[in-house]
Amino acid sequence: MCGIIGYVGTQNAAPILVESLKKLEYRGYDSAGITLLNKTIDTYKTIGKINDLEKILKDDIKGNIGIGHTRWATHGVPSTINSHPHNSGNISVVHNGIIENYLSIKEQLQKEGYTFLSETDTEVIAHLIHSKLYGSATNTKKICDFFTALQQALKELEGSYAIATVCSSEPDTMLAARKDSPLIIGMGNGEYYAASDVTAFLSHTKKVVFVDDLNIVKMQPNGVEFYDIDGNVIEKETTTINWDIEAAEKAGYEHFMLKEIHEQATSVYDTFAGKLSELDGSVNLEELNISDEDIRNIDRIEIIACGTSWNAGLLGKYLFEKLAGIHTDVDIGSEFRYGNPIMRNNVLSIAITQSGETADTLAAVKSCKAYGCNSIAITNVVGSSITRVVDSVLYTRAGPEIGVAATKTFTAQLIILYLLSIRFARTRGTINTNEAKDLLIELKRIPGKIQKILNRKAEIRECAEIFAEERDYFFVGRNVNYPVALEGALKLKEISYIHAEGFAGGELKHGPLALLDEGTPVVAIATKGHVYDKILSNIKEVKAREARVIAVAEKGDTEIEKYVDYVLRIPPTHEMLAPILSSVVLQLLAYYTALAKDCSIDKPKNLAKSVTVE
């Protein structure tokens, strides 16, 4: 979940690398560094953020080829010595991922005379390439070329990696490679980029090549070549990215998170645009590579996800069971991998990952494929690793999300789950045309209703500021509102550092009530529906313990005001669709709470945007 960048061109690489690292800082920000290739390798690195790196760069550093890195610590504590790039003689390497067999490689390299300075797994890559290039730590005569040395080194590495590396003995070349970690090549006019994310170089070029697993890329001033792990030349397709660079900037908002909350009226619309017909109650998912017969024969759905995506998946469980009549299980990717899942041909696996690179989710989906199950991925990133593993890909159209706390990608995932569950329900005949039309008509109104919530965000801010100094929060919901409670708690704890827990309303009496007192705010998602009276009963239980209650309820609901201290309103909508609107309210509640506490909202401590390691 670190960010890497490489540049080959005619300009001085240093300012380009620094600019790109700032775009990648959401992937990690405990340390940063760059290496410039100019007859020798000149490396600058430091603990801290990119601004700290800029302070140590010399004004006269030169080099038309360079690599850079912004780190989120996995092996080794945040420190200057553990920051990237890592060097071995005349070789410099940046790396995103985890080398699982680094200890055995390190022991062998130490026997060959290599000295290790850091605690990282990445340093073994630099020394291993040097060993393949020179034969030992002390030899100065090459025994092969740089490309061959990297190729041989990669064949010994186990785990995940996206690597960019340079060697001063071949000063016109940068090499890059990937396995299970994202790597994208930017194709400019006489300038070329290698990065973890297109946002790193989007201001320079929109033409990209997505690198596949076990590919090696040779980048030189006269062009880029792609190879497989055995050194065979391969042809790659160039894709044009339709994002504007402004989409990756704050656009006048104080934080990326607030900007991305406001973008949800658009991102929700973009995600369902062209896919539904409220006239006949149909959903068109032409990218779905599964036949109607197979849909009718599905016995069970297995949803696999992590974090916010898992919360989205839990709502998906309610949708698939209620609308399509399909038993659905939801598993955390990291747990699924080490259990004993019962998978058969008639089980459909659905992976949800905003980045398409979540390591645990990827591994879990690969294990599902081994059982012959049909598989679908819901992701926001075109060309990401998950798209090359599954049978079908359903893209959310949320655009780049920079804030670590997911907002617009979460609601976009929900939209895809609504569309998919309605599509399955229509195919299986579990809802009729009128029921589908009612849902789709109301779904098309959701963007406008999100905007109405945004227009009244001052009321949410006022409520957030009242409770900003509390130590604990409860969030409760029932049925489709239970996943919303979990997501609301997650958002609050992620960015405000307030301890928050989400509960199914009926579970309060089974333990959590023991923690309640007058100092604990309780957020109750109390939208209209078949469990409305039940959540009112839970609110009464909470009030009996003198806790203060904030209700998320529909406009026009006067009953709720009798039992709670504060009401945050959403526009009336279909019972099944209310979670989308409630989620926006809770995102704003978390944002304004963190703002009142002066927290680092876009870059919360100890977290990174994409979890690309186990």
Image (cartoon, rainbow, N blue to C red):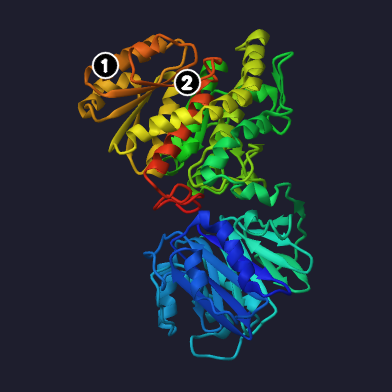
Q: Is residue 309 left or right of residue 560?
A: right
Asked whether residue 61 is in view, the answer is yes
Q: Quadrant of residue 290?
A: top right
Please determine whether, in this image, residue 612 is positioned above or below residue 579.
below
The local secondary structure at tag 1 comes to: helix
Q: How many marks overall?
A: 2
The type of residue carrying mark 1 is Glu
Residue 569: numbered disc:
2
> Tags 2 and 1 in contact by the CB under 8 Å rule?
no
Marks 2 and 1, the one that precedes in the sequence: 1
> Between 218 and 242, which is closer to the camera in this rendering?
242
* Picture residue at 63% right of the left edge, 39% below the top: 398
* Residue at the disc numbered 1: 541
Q: In the rendering, at what x and y percent does residue 459 appear?
A: 45, 27
Q: In the rendering, at what x and y percent does residue 121 appear?
A: 44, 67
Residue 159: numbered disc:
none
Asked whether residue 313 is in view, the answer is no
The type of residue carrying mark 2 is Arg
Q: Quadrant of residue 428?
A: top right
Q: CA distance from mark 2 to mark 1?
A: 22 Å
> Between 489 and 133, which is closer to the camera in this rendering?
489
Q: Is residue 304 left or right of residue 185?
A: left
Q: Is residue 586 left or right of residue 368?
A: left
Q: In the rendering, at what x and y percent does residue 586 appear?
A: 45, 31
Q: In the rendering, at what x and y percent does residue 5 appear?
A: 60, 64
* Picture residue at 56% right of the left edge, 56% below the top: 181
> Between 279 and 260, which is closer to the camera in this rendering?
260
